[in-house]
Image: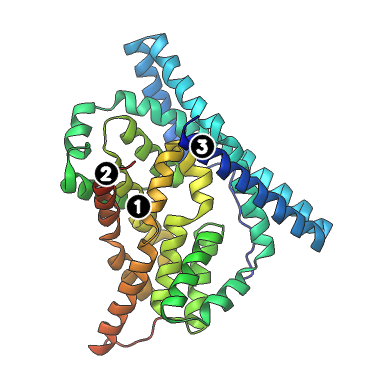
Amino acid sequence: MAERRRRVRTFEWSTAVIAAISVAAGAIVYLRDGTDRFIAILSNDLWLFTGMLPKMAAGCLIAAFVTRLLPREVVARVVGGESGIVGILIAMVMGAVLPGGPLTIYPVAGAFLLLGADVGTAVAFITAWNLLGYNRALIWELPFFGPEFVGWRILIALPLPIIAGLMARAAARAIAARGGGDQWT
Amino acid sequence: MDLIHVIGIVIGVILWGLVAALALTAAVRSKALFREGAFEGLRDFAVLIPRVLVGVVGSGYIAAVMPQDLVGHWIGPNSGLIGITIAAACGAATPGGAVVGFSIGAAALKGGAGAPQVIAYTTAWSLYTIQRLINWEIHMMAPRVVWLRAAISVPLPILAGIAAMLIGKP
């Protein structure tokens, strides 16, 4: 777990592809619907975007400080020692709080398993990171969808890490009972 | 001023209060820690601005050229459980990074898709987009755990979509 820095690359193929498609779509709108419609779409989206900028900035700063103040080794130790429903709840909170991309998250989940947490705990952690992480919600989801959509989306997703953790635990037990082994590391 | 705006302001205050508290904690530990954190946070923000901007503005234009009746027919507000399932399958099949997933989701929402269907899409994209499972997760965790997690997660986007449909929000 030596890698600590969350690197954001300056160029990304995904963005380039979306940019190319957007330019083509923008050109079609301009030619088909005229200047007024072209500008109306632009200003509408820019308005939502600029409104969300302060929250995006806060999200980036929180992520950068949490990465430094909450070492991944500590998270792994705290969650790795827990079990039962408490373990799933703690894993869920940690998954929502810990910033970073897949490069950060999967090794932490792997470390839980090595430290003795059950597979349900690791699944709850990854599910919470995917669905409840403030990092992704603030920086990505908010400028695209606006606060009302994101708020309801997160509220709806709240129970899902617990459900996933409990189902993974039950499945692991069933697999072990049928002779599939209980080695998950 | 409506409730949504009040909540938005409260969340903004909480977030920046959190930034202040974390920055202060870092500064108390060491000046270098504070400087590094502030620098990296602001640099990430600067790098992400154009990327998110491309996606947000792009999704508006993509929505405008999408065939609305086709989108509405398959994943519109009246497409129900079938639309939710289709949207979840699309989420699993979406390649590329965050900008792709969110651009498509936002374009679909602006272009006639229903909110429960879009929630199912983004939830599936977040949980088990196939490209991320194969490119990242499988190399960093025991494959057995990855497949178990993916299998368990299959119904979750559909549950989220149904929940959104039942409460009638957003």
On the same chain, marks 2 and 1? The answer is yes
Q: Secondary structure at mark 3?
A: helix
Residue that appears at 30% across and 40% down: B115
Q: Secondary structure at mark 1?
A: helix
Seen from the viewer's position, the closer of residues A158 and A177 is A158
Q: Residues within 10 Å of mark 2 (few under 14, many from 20)?
A: many
Quadrant the C terminus of chain B occupies: top left
Q: Residues within 10 Å of mark 3 (few under 14, many from 20)?
A: many
In this rendering, does residue A48 appear at all? yes
Seen from the viewer's position, the closer of residues B5 and A113 is B5
Mark closer to the observer (3, 1): 1
Q: Chain of mark 2?
A: B
Residue that appears at 49% across and 43% down: A140
Q: CA distance from mark 3 to mark 1?
A: 19 Å
Q: Position of residue B72 (x, y in %)?
A: 21, 33
Q: Position of residue B87 (x, y in %)?
A: 25, 46
Q: Which residue position holds label 2?
A: B117
Q: Which residue position holds label 3?
A: B52
Q: Which mark is residue B123?
A: 1
Disc 1 residue type? Thr
> What number of labels is visible?
3
In this rendering, does residue A21 appear at all? no
Q: Are marks 2 and 3 in contact (CB under 8 Å)?
A: no
Q: Position of residue A57 (x, y in %)?
A: 62, 42
Q: Residues within 10 Å of mark 1 (few under 14, many from 20)?
A: many
Seen from the viewer's position, the closer of residues B98 and B34 is B34
Disc 3 residue type? Val
Q: Chain of mark 3?
A: B
Residue that appears at 43% across and 46% down: A151
